[in-house]
């Protein structure tokens, strides 16, 4: 659904399309305006959520909204603190009114791949506690079938000692190939998550029954969580190239 038209001048006169950062910001701002009315708010991770938190801080100050923010990562916690927003946790706020987060890919059923930033475990826990889970993304994330846009695979968080056994079990069941995510330019060592675990990136071979895959992955000893979010998102806001915002 087209939610907000892009600027007319853009379609008419601009030779260049809206930047990716601009489209992230459009989606994030409209999602916050439409979904935050106060209460307990889950704050996702990544680059798009930065725009959402900026907007959130703006409307909280303008409207004197009473909110508590629950972070999904170290980054999210820092963002909440930086903007002077009230910080809470799941122990004191186990039910959230809304959770807003980015995604690496969103298909037509609102099945997501998340975890490009390695925060999938806490992101999934927090989203699962929210009455409404709102996804914000730029146009590159919108796809018909998972794997079309996000080619790095499904991130899977594993207990470090198990990573080789987990890799073998997934590939022998479904095929594809798996990389242990390495850190920095030098790739000298594994990425370690906020929870002290490793991340595997599974390049799956084809479109699969994602609910069955999600369950299969989480049944493997050593797997802590995977980046498939099936039947969790309620709505997605996409910032489009022409400056418009679409919802699904
Ligand atoms: C982190 C995530 C992010 O939400 C996802 O990678 C999208 O990030 P960005 O907004 O930078 O595109 O799942 O684990």
Image (tube, helix red, strand yellow):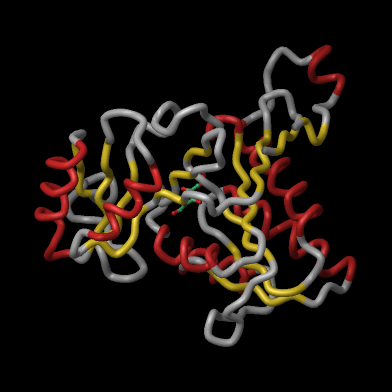
Question: In the rendering, at what x and y percent does residue 48 appear?
Answer: 59, 48
Q: Residue furthest bottom?
A: 92
In this view, 89 is above or below 16:
below
How many marks overall?
0
Question: In the rendering, at what x and y percent does residue 140 appear?
Answer: 54, 30
In the image shown, does 22 or 213 lie closer to the viewer? 213
Q: Residue furthest right?
A: 63
The quarter of the picture where residue 43 lies is bottom right
Question: In the rendering, at what x and y percent does residue 112 appear?
Answer: 48, 44
Q: Residue at x 74, y 35 (%)?
A: 245
Q: Residue at x 82, y 13 (%)?
A: 13
The quarter of the picture where residue 58 lies is bottom right
Is 212 left, or right, of 84 in this rendering? Answer: left
Question: In the rendering, at what x and y percent does residue 181 appear?
Answer: 25, 49
In the image shown, does 221 or 243 lie closer to the viewer? 221
Looking at the rendered image, the quarter that the N terminus falls into is top right
């Amino acid at each position: 659904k087209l939610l907000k038209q892009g600027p007319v001048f853009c379609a008419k006169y601009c030779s260049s399309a809206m930047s990716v950062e601009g489209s992230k910001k459009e989606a994030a701002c409209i999602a916050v305006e439409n979904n935050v009315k106060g209460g307990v708010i889950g704050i996702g991770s990544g680059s798009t959520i930065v725009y959402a938190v900026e907007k959130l801080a703006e409307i909280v100050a303008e409207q004197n909204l009473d909110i508590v923010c629950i972070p999904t990562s170290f980054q999210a916690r820092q963002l909440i603190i930086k903007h002077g927003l009230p910080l809470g946790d799941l122990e004191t706020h186990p039910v959230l009114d809304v959770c807003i987060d980015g995604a690496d890919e969103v298909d037509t059923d609102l099945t997501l791949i998340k975890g490009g930033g390695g925060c999938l475990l806490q992101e999934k826990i927090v989203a699962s506690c929210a009455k409404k889970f709102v996804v914000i993304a730029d146009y590159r994330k919108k796809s018909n079938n998972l794997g079309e846009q996000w080619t790095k695979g499904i991130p899977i968080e594993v207990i470090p000692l198990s990573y080789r056994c987990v890799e073998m079990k997934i590939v022998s069941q479904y095929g594809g190939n798996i990389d242990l995510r390495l850190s920095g330019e030098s790739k000298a060592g594994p990425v370690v998550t906020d929870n002290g675990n490793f991340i595997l990136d599974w390049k799956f071979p084809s479109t699969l029954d994602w609910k069955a895959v999600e369950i299969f992955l989480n049944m493997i000893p050593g797997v802590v969580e995977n980046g498939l979010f099936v039947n969790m998102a309620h709505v997605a806001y996409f910032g489009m190239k022409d400056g418009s915002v679409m919802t699904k």
